[in-house]
Image (cartoon, rainbow, N blue to C red):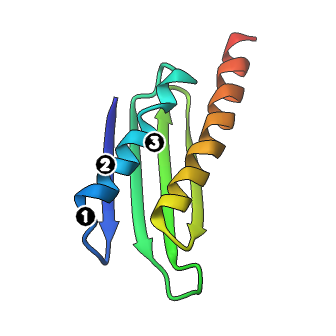
Amino acid sequence: MEIRVQSIKFDADQKLLDFVEKKLSRLPKFYDEITSIEVAMSLLPEHQNKNVKVHVRIPGNDLVVERNAKTFEDAVVDCADILKDKLVRAKEKKVE
């Protein structure tokens, strides 16, 4: 499984990239057929100005979660938690 991270309008430091990789590399535990994960991080003009969009590719359909937060780390954690639930539901549907 490949994790691609794209930072839009800023340069992400290695610490942030490692954090994203660490959090999202746990997702295959919940659905083992993930083919790739794409992460787009960008800055917004609003108060909670960090935006993270995670696109998880699985056979049959794709899951997309987008969150805004004060820090990229918070947004990534929120996305990972939501994706865990969605992947578990997708796996249960597949089994039925």
Q: CA distance from mark 2 to mark 1?
A: 9 Å
Residue that protrudes farthest toward the top in the picture: 95
Q: Secondary structure at mark 2?
A: helix
Q: Position of residue 72 (x, y in %)?
A: 46, 64
The total of numbered circles placed on residues is: 3
- Amino acid carrying label 3: it is Lys
User: Mark 1 or mark 2, which is nearer the start of the sequence?
Assistant: 1
What residue would you read off at disc 2? 18
Give the mark, 3 or 1, whose residue is nearer the N terminus.
1
In the rendered view of the protein, which quadrant contains the C terminus? Answer: top right
Task: Confirm whether residue 31 shows in the render.
Answer: no
Q: Residue 69, how many percent across, how many down? A: 58, 70
| Labels 3 and 2: the sequence-earlier one | 2
On the rendered structure, is 20 left or right of 49?
A: left
Identify which residue is drawn at 51% across, 54% down: 76
Where residue 83 is drawn, which disc sits there? Answer: none
Q: Residues within 10 Å of mark 3 (few under 14, many from 20)?
A: some
Q: CA distance from mark 3 to mark 1?
A: 16 Å
Q: Residue under circle 3?
A: 23
Horizontal arrangement in the rendering, residue 12 relative to residue 54 (left or right): left
Question: Callout 1, which amino acid?
Answer: Asp
**One can see residue 74 in this view:** yes
Pick the residue in front: 22 or 93: 22
Q: Residue furthest front?
A: 15
Secondary structure of residue under mark 1: loop
Query: Which quarter of the rendering shows the N terminus?
Result: top left
Instruction: Say which amino acid is labelled 2.
Output: Asp
Quarter of the figure with residue 7: bottom left
Q: CB atoms at circles 2 and 1 under 8 Å apart?
A: no
In the rendered structure, are the residues bearing label 3 and label 2 in contact, judged by CB atoms less than 8 Å apart? no
